[in-house]
DNA sequence: CGCGGCTTTGATGTTCATCAAGTAAAGTGG
DNA sequence: CCACTTTACTTGATGAACATCAAAGCCGCG
């Protein structure tokens, strides 16, 4: 019989991909699971590390990126809880294709990959649910990458501000979780021009800036800029 | 008992994701399957169409793209047989997120989506195999998009030429399956500059051009340009 | 032919990266 | 807690990269 004290049973993250598991399966899940804490700046895993676990973000914020030969980072995604850290690569590759770093203090839930694979094989509904979730995450990354690629400088900056305000913080006021340089790495532009564009938005009364704190003043205008560029 | 005349049994595409199916399952697969032919330029499905089938390309070549509000295309992928047409969206969405058009005469194998979902639920190894394949395709698209984004004009043109010569045609000489404008839409550059860059490659003796026919003369140089830019 | 679409090339202007120099902020050691 | 160092941020000036516009050549097709 399942252990009623298993933390996973009541975890609000069961909705992610584990809603179809029965009590016994949840109990097993619990035993193959560990929780890992990372401080802001902590490296969760590096490009090339072997994949042994299915990981997802329980709290905090992380950036997914790859490093170019010349040493600088190309940021692929900044994701909040409810979105997996391990992308789909966990099934297609033995090694991580991208590095992941905590950009706020974060807690990662790590489940032994062998157990997940076993569940996929034994439990059809789980397989379907997991597939759906993983697909959604891939879709989202591809879509965002295309959105960024199709915009010019100011369109990209507007887009990313809207992303933070809506998808990440759900608030008109928020503290930028990343440096100006990291925004630049995210939207593939130079740091100087990101800063310049933010300053122009400030001068035009579209946003307010206090160091890392951003307030979106005129979201309609920002949307217009984002869709034009 | 399975029908021994089922075409699917010996189809070389069983390796894609159906290698684990037994005889009976293959026979069922056969009955839920239809083959669709498209002429060059034929629309396979459009962004927004409902997803009823799991489709893959049996022969030919297709482009996957989305259309911007302003009417022009953003090409996401050009894929050859052995790669699915339906991306992962089939599990995460009810409608296609992208349009797909044949750029050479093509044959699509279309399998009723309900049947695939049923297989996933009933057959664990199939689920795992399918998941792996779908993940690989997503990975590839993401990787290519990032590769393109991180390069400048000439680096992008070099990259895409290498992609055609290696991944699509596996030959130093090939007929470009797309117009110059489509290349431009693929790498997010202007048509004029794509043409200009091709001309420069020609002048520098890196490639030869006869209309749509391209011959890669100096592949090392092309690789160098691709990795620098 | 002659029309329309694709291609090519040149000229021009815009967008953007780079460089440089300075300021603010955030660690660091005494 | 303060001087010192380092890192992040900001702004302007310059040039390179790239888009856009325009005009002409080419090619397939009715």
Image: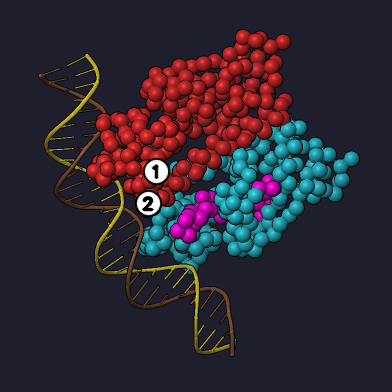
Chain colours: A cyan, B red, C brown, D yellow
The N terminus of chain B lies in quadrant: top right
Of marks 1 and 2, which one's residue comes earlier in the chain?
1
Answer with the quarter of the image where residue B17 lies: top right
Q: Tell me residue B15's x, y (percent).
A: 60, 26
Against A178, residue B155 (above or below) is: above
Task: Report the magenta residues as a range.
Answer: A51-77
In this rendering, the count of numbered labels is 2
Q: In the shown orientation, is residue C14 left or right of residue B174?
A: left
Residue in front for this viewpoint, A42 or A163: A42
- The residue singled out by tag 2 in the image is B229
Residue in front for this viewpoint, A75 or B132: B132
Q: In the shown orientation, is residue B79 left or right of residue B157?
A: right
Residue at image x 41%, y 50%? B227
Residue at image x 28%, y 41%? B198
Q: Which residue lies furthest to the right in this view?
A: A1
Q: Tell me residue A49's x, y (percent).
A: 62, 52
Say whether residue B122 is magenta: no
Q: In the shown orientation, is residue A24 left or right of residue B214?
A: right
Q: Tell me residue A2's x, y (percent).
A: 86, 42
- The residue singled out by tag 1 in the image is B159
Q: What kind of element bears circle 1?
A: helix
- Looking at the rendered structure, which numbered label has been put on residue B225? none
Residue density around tag 1, few if under 14, some if 14–19, many if 20 or more, within 10 Å: many
| Predominant SS of the magenta segment | strand
Residue at image x 63%, y 34%? B131
Marks 1/2 same chain: yes
Residue at image x 30%, y 39%? B207
Chain for disc number 1? B
Q: Tell me residue B122's x, y (percent).
A: 72, 25
Against B32, residue A9 (above or below) is: below
């Amino acid at each position: 019989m399942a252990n009623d004290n298993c933390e996973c049973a009541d975890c609000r993250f069961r909705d992610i991909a584990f809603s179809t598991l029965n009590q016994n399966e949840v109990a097993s899940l619990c035993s193959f699971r560990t929780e890992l804490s990372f401080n802001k700046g902590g490296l969760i895993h590096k490009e090339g590390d072997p994949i042994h676990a299915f990981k997802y973000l329980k709290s905090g914020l992380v950036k997914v990126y790859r490093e170019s030969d010349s040493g600088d980072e190309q940021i692929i995604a900044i994701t909040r809880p409810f979105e997996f850290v391990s992308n789909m690569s966990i099934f297609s590759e033995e090694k991580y294709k991208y590095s992941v770093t905590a950009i706020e203090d974060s807690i990662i839930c790590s489940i032994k990959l062998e157990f997940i694979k076993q569940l996929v094989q034994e439990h059809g509904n789980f397989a379907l649910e997991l597939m759906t979730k993983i697909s959604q995450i891939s879709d989202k990354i591809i879509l965002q990458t295309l959105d960024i690629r199709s915009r010019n400088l100011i369109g990209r900056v507007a887009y990313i501000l809207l992303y933070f305000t809506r998808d990440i913080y759900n608030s008109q006021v928020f503290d930028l979780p990343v440096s100006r340089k990291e925004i630049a790495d995210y939207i593939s532009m130079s740091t100087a021009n990101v800063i310049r564009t933010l300053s122009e938005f400030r001068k035009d009364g579209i946003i307010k800036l206090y160091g890392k704190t951003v307030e979106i003043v005129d979201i309609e205008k920002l949307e217009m800029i984002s869709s034009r560029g």
